[in-house]
Amino acid sequence: MDPLLSAAVKTHVNAAKITRQSKSNLALAFISLGRERKRDITIFYAFCRVIDDIADSSELSVAEKRVRLEAWRKMLRTADADEVPLAHDVRSLIDKYSLSTAMLEEIIAGVEMDLSISRYATFEELRVYCYRVASAVGLVSIEIFGYRNPRCKEYALELGLALQMTNIIRDVGRDLRYGRIYLPQEDLARLNYSEAELQDRQYNERFVRLMEFEATRAQEFFSLAAAALPSEDRRAMVPAQIMSSIYRGLLRQMELDKFRVFEKEYRLSKMEKVGQIAAQLLKNL
């Protein structure tokens, strides 16, 4: 391995530890899986978490982030004595489930977009980002969950878009702190809400209408996903359905509260999440 890349990947990375430490809703969804698939999806989740953390790091320069992401691209394809154990585990998943290495590289390309892009002119441009950081994750995940009907891929694609749009709505204020605006510029213009107002965190009727517009888009993706889920794959996709249920609940919470995302960090309570999980488990028994 190149010395520069070697320095970037020597830290031991433990997949289970990453999952335990994360408060992601994705980790909660794993409860429905058997031991082997839970272990495997945990490895994949850890990969996604590590990649995302590299892009979001406040301690690394953009150049250092690119070096580390490039190191992961190489580790997906080739073993190296200096690599972290997680890389070996991810390659084992690729072999076990015949995963597309290109799809994993799409996820890397997605987080890498954050290194150079902080605005999106149109939704079609944003859609590329959402596909890479969310739909691609879903398309890999369903291979691990196991499915029979190829239409399940459409389900994963649409659900990924729905989840990421919900994230974008929830994180408007947080993303501003990083200098990022994921809301398409064409949408701000359409709803007559300027970027200057957004930067000033001006909460007004036009901002609420903008958020309602984005929420409607997210709901449409949730509906498209639900319609695409093959009946024979419903049980296998329980983890994804749990995610869908939690995020739809989160979106509904924001809608009812008129999207006060500048002053609040929206999340479902533990009891609300448990209720959503239990409902999905019971529905698919």
Image: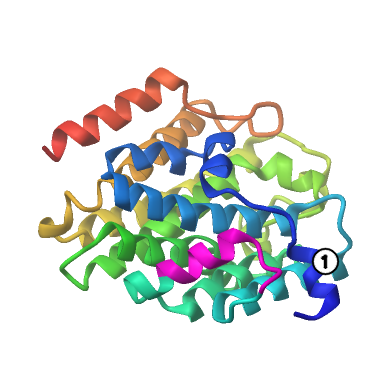
Rendering quarter of residue 87: bottom right
* Quarter of the rendering containing residue 260: top right
**Residue located at (25% from left, 46% from top):** 238
- Whether the magenta-drawn stretch holds residue 2 is answered as no
Horizontal and vertical percent position of residue 22 = 57, 38
Give the answer, above or below, for where 149 lies relative to 23.
Answer: below
Residue 38's spot in the image, x, y percent? 35, 47
Percent position of residue 95, x then y: 39, 75
Q: Position of residue 276 (x, y in %)?
A: 31, 30
Q: Nearer the viewer, residue 54 or 133?
A: 54
Specify the farthest residue to the front. 81
| Residue indicated by mark 1 | 7
Task: Check disc 1 and give the amino acid type.
Answer: Ala
Q: Is residue 115 left or right of residue 172?
A: right
Rate crowding at label 1 as few (under 14), some (14 to 19) or many (20 or more) other CA atoms within 10 Å: some
Q: Is residue 1 left or right of residue 18?
A: right
Q: Quick check: 14 above or below 204?
A: below
The residue that appears at 80% across and 81% down in the rendered structure is 2
Residue 86: within the magenta? yes
Q: Is residue 242 visible?
A: yes
Q: Magenta segment, which residues?
A: 81-93
Q: Quadrant of the C terminus?
A: top left
Residue 183 visible in the shown view: no
For the image shown, how many numbered marks are present on the structure?
1
Return the residue nearer the eye: 54 or 184.
54
Instruction: Please state, as top left, top right, bottom left or bottom right, where the N terminus lies in the image.
Output: bottom right
**Is 79 rendered above or below residue 178?**
below
At x 16%, y 58%, the residue is: 233
In-front residue for pair 26/162: 26
Disc 1 secondary structure class: helix
